[in-house]
Amino acid sequence: MADITSKFTRSRSLPRVKWSQVVDHAILIAGALFMIVPLLMVLQTTTTSDIETMRHGPSLMIGTELDDNFRKAMFEASGFSGENSGMSMLMNSLILGIGFAVGKIVIGMMAAYAIVYFRLRFATMAFWLIFTTLLLPLEVRILPSYEITQKLGLLNTYTGLIVPLIASATATFFFRQFFRSVPEELVEAARIDGAGPVKFFIDVLVPLSQTMIAAMFIIMFVYGWNQYLWPTMVTTEESMYTLVRGIKQIVQVLEGNEIPQYGRANMLAIIAVIPPVAVVIFFQSWFVKGLTDSDK
Amino acid sequence: MKRAGFSTRWLPILLLVPQLSIILLFFYWPAGYAIKSSFYLQDPFGFGQTFVGLENYTSLTASSEYLKVARFTLLFTVLVTFFSLALALLLAVKADNVIRGAKTYRTLLMWVYAVAPPVAGFIGLMMFNQRWGPLTELFGALGWDYNLGVDYSDTAFAMVLVSVWKQVPVNFIFFLSGLQSIPKAVREAALIDNRSGTRRFWDVTFPLLAPTGFFLLIINITYALFDTFGVVDTLVKGEPGNNPMTLVYKVYVDGFRGNDLGGSSAQSVILMILVLALTVFQFRMVERRIHYT
């Protein structure tokens, strides 16, 4: 049947145009352009000189200043201390992104394991203590969090940057859901084989969770990398700036009376965008699965 | 709790200690601290504090500036939520329809998810540059003298547009995965019953997507309230001045810049109540949904 119809259509000289499909594609192309054109314009201005950009803004021409702008962005600092070069901000962003993701996954897995697999007298209380944190985002308690971090002497440290961000149970909740879907027989079999709880966790549960860990890592890495408000508050020393936090300073530099450093600014914006976008695109299927599974 | 668990005593406690200590230190303590300081008036020179009861709250509700910010936040949230959901739904339905290039479209439409809000704001600054911003020029050609950062409603427009741009991908991903989970049998039955694509969408697809849509509604409201901080901060270049701002931005401006801990804490507590109300509403709706199916 399918054969006949395909032969039938092929024998016609002109393929039939389905207008509804043309409309579908037109809408999708318009949507894709809406998404990507702004970034392409910023990308174009990383190839032109500051004066050129200041006069004309983005254009269709690809300039010759790409390497110069890259050098300025990565190795020259704009601040007073001279310590916020792109290189150091990139390092800090990586530390924040990876530290946040790893910390959240490790702590979340441990707590979820304790809640799901052990008989505990205060299990219900621990459960509620942990899952109430899902209700309030950091933004609503931002000022007291800052005061407490300050009291503990953690301003301008990686601990102060990362740990308060970990204080919510999203990963714990996610791993709890996953552990509950793991068949009961596994833990029974492990016990019959004489495996203790530590061995079971490391040899059975962690390997089983690999895909989940990968998906969580991508989401948490992007989330950590993109943090803005918290780093703006706790890092005041330029050597501790992340790329995303540095955007604030970049924007203020653009206001100066001299020629604004568009090349450097736009290049830094692009550098701040590339790692999380690359991770999301390359690990797309894990990422989509992790995102749509975790929130429901 | 699994039926067959381990009964070791010390291990689970050891496993829970890191999580519990972090949330006690950086969640419960700050949250409690916010509630407590919302009832106190902080001495501006740091000499202690006096208990003032509900005064911080009553002065907020009496402040025309606070009410103006609240009104703007409400309008902003409605606009961002509506447009990012509607656009994403349209794109997801089309991406689900097409056969050729479906994967490419998906990638092109979702990557903005990974762009940080302040970077999105920065890109917005470029698009709306007074001198040569492509959108400023476009609006100029249409006779709109666009002025970011000077004109209140022009700045508000940029905030909404950039926030929508940043939020469409998340909604798109969820809508697309929701559409793809609709069973083939249901689609085929609908196709036989109803030839009109539009009718089929509103009568069959849309109701089946409602749970996803409702979930996204809450996500989007939370996004517009809290996560747009970076967009707002970069678009006003850190100087709110006469520009519109959201409630979270005001908490930051009053507390961090203005050193008004009591007033800022009262604002935090109001936001907490708002989020809690949203969550309770969400749970009740989810319960009802399960009841239906």
Image (tube, helix red, strand yellow):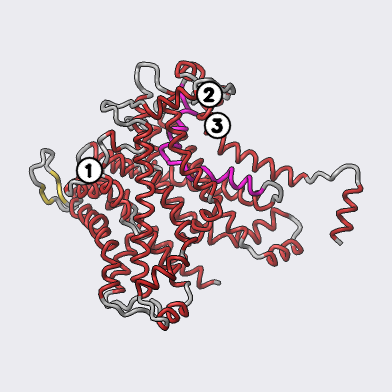
Q: Residue at x 31, y 68 (%)?
A: A128
Q: Are marks 2 and 3 in contact (CB under 8 Å)?
A: no
User: In the rendered image, which residue does mark 2 sit on?
Assistant: A58
Q: Which residues are magenta?
A: B102-130
Residue B113 highlighted magenta (yes or no): yes
Q: Amino acid at mark 1?
A: Leu
Query: What's the distance in space between the residues labelled 2 and 3, CA to CA?
Result: 9 Å
- In the rendered view of the protein, which quadrant contains the C terminus of chain B? bottom right
Marks 1/3 in contact by CB < 8 Å: the verdict is no
Residue density around tag 2, few if under 14, some if 14–19, many if 20 or more, within 10 Å? many
Q: Amino acid at mark 3?
A: Leu
Mark 2 / mark 1, whichever is N-terminal: 2
User: In screen coordinates, is B30 left or right of A274?
Assistant: left
Q: Nearer the viewer, mark 2 or mark 1?
A: 1
Find disc 3 in the rendering and name its residue. A40
Please tell me which residue is depicted at 26% across the width and 42% down the height of the picture: A234
- The percent coordinates of residue B49 (x first, y second) are 11, 47
What residue does disc 1 label? Answer: A155
Distance from Cα at disc 1 to Cα at disc 3: 37 Å
Residue beneath the point at 18% across and 49% down: A152
Q: Main secondary structure of the magenta part?
A: helix
Give the residue drawn at x 56%, y 50%.
B172
* For residue B120, above or below residue A218: above
